Image: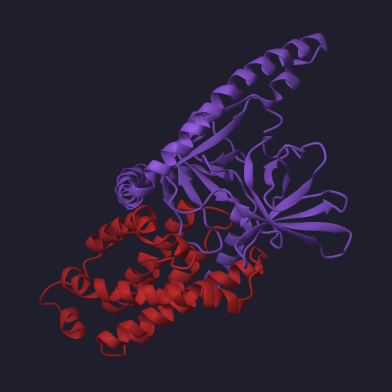
Chain colours: A red, B purple
Amino acid sequence: MRMNRTILITLLLLLVQTSILPWLIPSGWSDRLLPHLPFVMTVFVALLGGRYKAFFFGLGFGLLEDILFYGELLGTYGFSLALIGYLIGLVGERKSHLLSFMLLAIGLGSLIMDSIVYFVYQLFKLTGDSYLFALYWQIVPTMLLHVAIALLLYLPARRKLTKPGSGEEKSAT
Amino acid sequence: MIGLILFVSLLGFSYGRTGLTWPERFVNDAVGTVQEALYRPVGAVSDFFRDLGRLSDVYEENEQLRQTVARYTQDKIRYNMIENENKRLQDELHFTERQKQLYDYRYLIAQVIASSSNPYDKTIKINLGSNDGIKPKMAVTTVDGLVGLVSTVSEFTSTVTPISELDSSSADAISIAATVLGREDQSFGIVDYDKENKVLQMSKIDENDQVVEGDLIVTSGLGNVLPKGLIIGTVISNQVGDFGLTHTATIEPAAKFDHLNEVFVVVTSDVDAP
């Protein structure tokens, strides 16, 4: 796993997410489709690089995102991304790295991340929506978008971010 | 476990804070410059394609604008007359300096440089900061109407919370005192956002107060959070409120909250009434 390159690319993706993606999402959907590219990258790191790398990777980028868009709370994304990176890394170490497993990890991870964020905001009484409404309105559409983005990014990411000839490459194919 | 405790304390600590420490300000400004370089060209391209699609409407729009300009010139003449009259009367009545400057607003043009993907905290970033005189709780508008309030400020960028996040059921609610354009002295209500129906609600309207469909709602300036006379939206319907004593009107927001390009920050000259 080439960490320096991964971090650089994820920084670029974060900029793309905050400054370019809002223009591509149609007007009526802008509060339903809320992709997090650092989240997708965290899952990749968890599958290709292991749980400890993924933990710190998720923590760093989650906190960065929190600080950049500080509205009410700091640390919701830092917490949820670090947790998801660690959990997926833990499960992924024993499984073969098939494409279907990666998609499952992205889908479940996306559900868990948005649910954690929802429950944190509900805990602090910052949102009044019911969980079912949040699920239907935002969490499920965003999950589908995450899966699509992951499909687009997975092959280039696997080719560019793993060291050629290392054991990681073998286990990744 | 320790991580969980740390995070809960971080969440609690950061909640309700308005100032930023220097690392936060530094990160905001550093990333903000790159975001600005990306957001504006993409916005321009996207606007270009939208304009291409609307080319057929241009004639009609031009006709409308011409009528508006004609009306505007007439109003401008009238406004100048009334303003002079007003100044003379203020002098005669010995208004204090503070009272005179109460409605003297400056509009700073800001570019939006990024928008967040957090569903419960949808903030946008603009390219003006404390260096340009931006302070927290300043109102932000577009040409259409009120968009939001400045929430945090760093040197060269600041974060804006849209009014769609000012949910009355949440703990951080800021209510907007509002009134009807043209009947400022008779109407009064409190505006907040109804997230499930995606509309604004104006509650606590007096029963005898006739707020009807199509009325233009503006900020009233009471409560000293927002300046006076910023357009909020138009009334869609008006019904009896929860307890039957007051009325609640549903309001269509005038401004849209996504695909924003240019916004205006309203700077009031008075320090103690932002």
Q: Is residue B239 left or right of residue A168?
A: right
Quarter of the figure with residue B167: bottom right
- Residue drawn at x 43%, y 46% is B28
Location of residue B39 in the rendering, given as x and y in whole percent from the top left corner? 35, 47
Between residue B97 and residue A42, name the one nearer to us: B97
Spot the residue most to the left. Answer: A165
Location of residue B190 in the rendering, given as x and y in whole percent from the top left corner? 75, 50
Q: Is residue B37 left or right of residue B204?
A: left
- Residue drawn at x 42%, y 56% is A64
- Residue drawn at x 26%, y 90% is A96
- Residue A168 visible? The answer is yes
Between residue B47 and residue B115, name the one nearer to us: B47
| Quadrant that contains the N terminus of chain B | bottom right
Between residue A118 and residue A172, name the one nearer to us: A118
Mark count: 0
| Quadrant that contains the C terminus of chain B | top right
Is residue B16 positioned above or below B243 on the image? above
Location of residue B93 in the rendering, given as x and y in whole percent from the top left corner? 83, 12
Is residue A146 positioned above or below B60 on the image? below
- Residue B128 visible? The answer is no
Between residue B31 and residue B140, name the one nearer to us: B140
